[in-house]
Amino acid sequence: MNTVRKTRLQRKMTQRDLAGKVGTSQQQIQRIENGQTPTLELACRISSALKAELTELFPIETRALNRK
């Protein structure tokens, strides 16, 4: 299961709830939960809204950033 989805469900939030908190659409949250990589700005807003570390929610993307 996608880490964003798992964390969102643990927080008892719907995709619509999360989308409202981060200023995007429910469809965008759905795409991210299905594997689309968000922008760094959106990933940070999701991390903040879910009160979770960015590196926990997006481990593969974070590793790619650390290589540069």
Image (tube, rainbow, N blue to C red):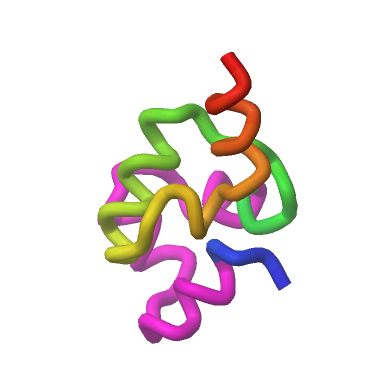
Tell me which secondary structure the magenta stretch mostly adopts: helix
Q: Position of residue 21 (x, y in %)?
A: 26, 55
Q: Report the residue that reaches farthest toward the front.
A: 67
Q: Is residue 55 magenta?
A: no
Residue drawn at (60%, 65%), measured in percent from left and top?
3
Please tell me whether residue 44 is drawn above or below residue 33 in the rendered image: above
Q: Is residue 36 left or right of residue 40?
A: right
Q: Closer to the camera, 21 or 40?
A: 40
Q: In the rendered image, which quarter contains the C terminus?
A: top right
Q: Is residue 7 magenta?
A: yes
Residue drawn at (67%, 65%), measured in percent from left and top?
2
Please tell me whether residue 62 is drawn above or below residue 56 in the rendered image: above
Among the 4 quarters of the image, the one containing residue 12: bottom left
Q: Closer to the camera, 14 or 57?
A: 57
Q: Position of residue 30 (x, y in %)?
A: 61, 56
| Residue stretch rendered in magenta on the structure | 5-31
Residue drawn at (37%, 30%), measured in percent from left and top?
41
Q: Is residue 12 left or right of residue 3?
A: left
Q: Report the residue that reaches farthest toward the top.
A: 68
Q: Closer to the camera, 13 or 16?
A: 13
Q: Position of residue 53 (x, y in %)?
A: 37, 56
